[in-house]
Image (cartoon, helix red, strand yellow):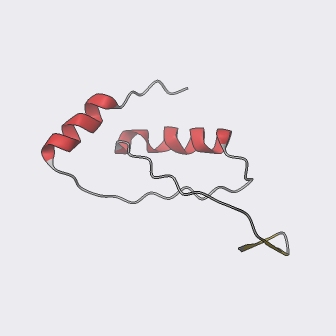
């Protein structure tokens, strides 16, 4: 439940955790805003560190096509 435009709203919501590289943060925000149905979606950045093998994989698996 949350306040929106002076009313208490009760919606079913889902949380998505999207893994990407720091260089694509702006692209990710833009894409979420374009596809999300809310006027003000919650887009949060939580910085984390990973093991070297995972870091290598995520960099190799992430494409920057800047739609």
**Residue 2 drawn above or below residue 48:** below
Residue 56: % across, % down: 19, 36
Residue 5: % across, % down: 84, 69
Q: Quadrant of the N terminus?
A: bottom right
The residue that appears at 23% across and 35% down in the rendered structure is: 57
Residue 14 in which image quadrant? bottom right
Q: Quadrant of the C terminus?
A: top right
The residue that appears at 37% across and 40% down in the rendered structure is: 23
Residue 63: % across, % down: 39, 27
1 on left or right of 58: right
Residue 58 in which image quadrant? top left
40 on left or right of 30: right
55 on left or right of 30: left
The residue that appears at 70% across and 57% down in the rendered structure is: 40
**Residue 49 drawn above or below residue 60:** below
Work out whether residue 28 or residue 8 is closer to the camera in this orientation and state it: 8
The residue that appears at 64% across and 59% down in the rendered structure is: 13
Residue 3 in which image quadrant? bottom right
């Amino acid at each position: 439940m949350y306040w929106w435009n002076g009313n208490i709203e009760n919606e079913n919501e889902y949380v998505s955790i999207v893994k990407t590289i720091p260089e694509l943060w702006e692209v990710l925000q833009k894409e979420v805003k374009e596809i999300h149905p809310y006027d003000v979606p919650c887009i949060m950045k939580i910085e984390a560190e990973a093991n070297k093998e995972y870091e290598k994989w995520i960099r190799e698996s992430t494409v920057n096509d800047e739609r």
